[in-house]
């Protein structure tokens, strides 16, 4: 079926995001390409015109005939919807919202300046949200014509080295001049743009891949989900919501829900760039009209099939640190978390798979890397929380089938479960950071038996999971992608503020599910040390120095302790009222000279703070 039921033509819509540093010429590029402008088009915001910069997402489009190599597709025309994103550092939250609806990303770089701070942040967003990147080298007209070709070649080589560290190793770079002579003001006009034809040709080469990914995502039943970016009234008609269909299909006359407002409305009509349509599907850009809705209640958000999008204030997520973020990412730190068009403050705590018995930390890191690849965190592929439902495009998100790694197939089946134990992690690290730390410290074995016993099973976990507890509720699909950032960082510093990203696995409403976080079995290893005060007989000793006198020793009764020589005993209970305790060694305790040390090690489940449950 056609992607959009046009009255006269079958049109394939491809959403193209235009991202880059402020003043790199993104809006000028969109203006040079576009032939249709929506109600939320280029710099409609009054302050945008006044200040000469983009302050919000802008939408416009152009169409192109279907080329011969795509004649097998069931369409008469291809429409490119351009999503013009702001470049100012303080507006990166808006960029994150816009990036999640795009099929292809155009990264605009000022050829005279190269990679700048927000260019790098936009590149990170692209790595997380899309598989198709096209680099646009803008403002070539500002280079003296005599040395223009040489300077463009040098910048292309320089940027190529930068992109080698990303999944866009072989990305194409197209030199253009979107507004020759420079933008005097934000109005249209001036000399014609150069290089646009080459740019459109490169976009056409990416149409089929974008279409195939969309078809792959549409396999199976999808609920309707629509990302709204603009809302306005039409007198006598109702309120129009403009946006992009993220999933599913809907038709005129169907009922939809505005989940943040808990309202249901019937669709009166739909249009795509002023052309009426009867239904829409994933990827389409359009406006839908509903009656009796105050447009002031919703400027941006979601429209969905009724009762399919939850509101929650906590979530269990897959988590992966963004390698360009150089600051520490630690448990109990607060982050700005962007899901869909929403950004809310949340406290993060990290945990990972329990290391195998006797595993070196290096092995744990490798296993974690395979797990994240299996969950396709770094790829927007056809993925469920339990593994893959189809092939991705490779790179960091390569599936088990693509790599042929049998152990990876096993790991991808390890989705989150309340029934399994996890290792609590104080830090979220990149694989590179973990390997560097290991190379510097090594996997040295303990020198004596006592220390070996004390650290037995204490291989640090590598964080692959995260609990996010939000300061205020968020409303989005329970399998949404998210990006966590530190927007409180100085925007003038040359550093990436995007900290980590991933996918929501389980959404939790703490009012309805008060134990939704508590029952996660993530533990810390705790250790207490004491000494033998006196030996009662061959099997029994009295210990001291491990507990305070006010400690309830009944909580520790039956737990195992080990001596420096490896002898294992069990705590039978308290002895007296000063924190001393009785330990029984079933196999006896040998005669020793000097102080006999006792070590008690146990797991404490971190999230159930009230119960303070301990296990060995």
Image: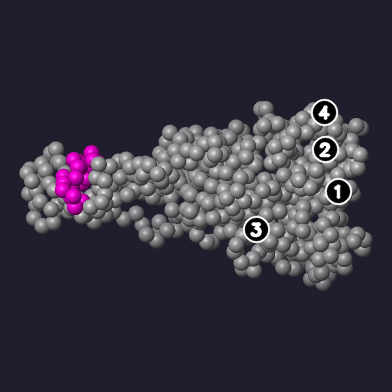
> Is label 2 or label 3 in front?
2
Q: Residue at x 57, y 48 (%)?
A: 470
Q: Residue beneath label 4, please?
A: 253
Q: Looking at the image, which is closer to me, 240 or 27? A: 240
- Tell me the quadrant of the picture where the N terminus can be found: top right
The CA span between labels 1 and 2 is: 20 Å
Label 4 secondary element: loop
- Picture quarter with the C terminus: top left
Residue 433 at what x, y percent from top left?
47, 57
Q: With respect to residue 147, does 463 lie above or below?
A: above
Give the residue number, with chain letter if any, for mark 3: 121
- Distance between mark 1 and mark 4 Cα atoms: 23 Å
Instruction: Indicate which label's residue lies in the foreground, 3 or 4.
Output: 4
Residue 453 versus residue 417 in the image, above or below: below
Would you say 326 lies left or right of 88 here?
left
Q: On the rendered structure, is 375 left or right of 279?
A: left
The magenta segment:
557-582
Q: Residues within 10 Å of mark 1 (few under 14, many from 20)?
A: some
- The residue under label 2 is 292
The spot of residue 302 in percent (x, y) is: 72, 41
Instruction: Measure the alpha-carbon separation of dots 4 and 2.
Output: 15 Å
Q: Disc 1 vs disc 3: which is toward the camera?
A: 1
Marker disc for residue 247: none
């Amino acid at each position: 079926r056609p992607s959009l039921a046009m009255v006269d033509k079958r049109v394939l819509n491809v959403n193209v995001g235009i991202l880059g540093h402020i003043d790199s010429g993104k809006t000028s590029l969109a203006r040079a390409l576009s032939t249709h402008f929506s109600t939320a088009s280029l710099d409609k915001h009054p302050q945008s015109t006044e200040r000469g910069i983009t302050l919000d997402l802008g939408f416009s489009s152009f169409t192109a005939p279907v080329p011969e190599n795509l004649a097998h597709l069931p369409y008469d025309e291809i429409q490119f919807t351009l999503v013009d994103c702001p470049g100012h550092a303080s507006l990166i939250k808006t960029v994150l919202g816009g990036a999640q609806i795009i099929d292809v990303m155009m990264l605009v770089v000022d050829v005279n300046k190269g990679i700048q701070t927000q260019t790098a942040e936009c590149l990170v967003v692209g790595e997380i949200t899309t598989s198709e990147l096209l680099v646009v080298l803008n403002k070539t007209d500002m280079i003296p014509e005599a040395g223009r070709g040489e300077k463009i070649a040098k910048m292309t080589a320089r940027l190529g080295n930068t992109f080698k560290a990303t999944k866009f190793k072989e990305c194409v770079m197209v030199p253009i001049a979107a507004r020759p002579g420079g933008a005097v003001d934000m109005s249209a006009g001036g000399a014609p743009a150069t290089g646009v034809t080459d740019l459109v040709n490169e976009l056409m080469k990416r149409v089929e891949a974008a279409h195939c990914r969309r078809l792959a995502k549409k396999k199976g039943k999808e609920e309707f989900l629509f990302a709204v970016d603009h809302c306005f009234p039409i007198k006598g008609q109702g309120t129009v919501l403009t946006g992009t269909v993220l999933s599913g299909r809907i038709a005129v006359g169907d009922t939809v829900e505005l989940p943040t407002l808990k309202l249901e409305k019937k669709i009166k009509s739909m249009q795509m760039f002023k052309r009426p349509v009867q239904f829409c599907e994933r990827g389409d850009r359009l406006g839908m009209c509903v009656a009796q809705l105050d447009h002031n209640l919703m400027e941006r958000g979601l429209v969905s099939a009724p009762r399919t999008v939850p509101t929650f204030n906590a979530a269990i997520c897959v988590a992966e640190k963004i390698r360009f973020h150089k600051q520490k990412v630690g448990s109990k730190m607060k982050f700005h978390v962007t899901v869909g068009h929403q950004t809310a403050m949340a406290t993060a705590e990290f945990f990972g798979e329990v290391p195998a018995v006797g595993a070196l930390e290096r092995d744990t890191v490798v296993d974690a890397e395979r797990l994240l690849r299996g969950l396709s965190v770094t790829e927007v592929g056809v993925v469920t929380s339990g593994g893959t439902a189809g092939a991705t495009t490779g790179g960091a998100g390569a599936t088990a089938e693509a790599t042929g790694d049998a152990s990876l197939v096993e790991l991808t089946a390890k989705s989150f479960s309340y029934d399994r134990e996890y290792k609590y992690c104080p830090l979220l690290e990149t694989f590179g950071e973990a390997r560097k730390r290991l190379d510097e410290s090594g996997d040295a074995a303990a020198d004596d038996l006592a220390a070996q016993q004390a650290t037995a099973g204490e291989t640090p976990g590598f964080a692959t999971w995260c609990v996010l507890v939000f300061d205020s509720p968020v409303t989005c699909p329970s399998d949404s992608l998210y990006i966590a950032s530190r927007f409180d960082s100085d925007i003038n510093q040359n550093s990436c503020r995007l900290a980590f990203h991933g996918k929501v696995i389980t959404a939790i409403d703490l009012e309805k599910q008060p134990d939704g976080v508590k029952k996660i079995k993530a533990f810390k290893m705790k250790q207490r040390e004491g000494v033998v005060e006196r030996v009662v007989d061959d099997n029994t000793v009295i210990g001291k120095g491990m507990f305070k006198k006010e400690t309830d020793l009944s909580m520790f009764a039956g737990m195992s302790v080990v001596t420096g020589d490896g002898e294992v005993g069990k705590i039978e209970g308290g002895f007296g009222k000063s924190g001393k305790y009785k330990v029984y060694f079933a196999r006896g305790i040998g005669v020793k000279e000097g102080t006999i040390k006792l070590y008690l090690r146990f797991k404490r489940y971190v999230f159930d703070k009230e119960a303070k449950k301990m296990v060995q």
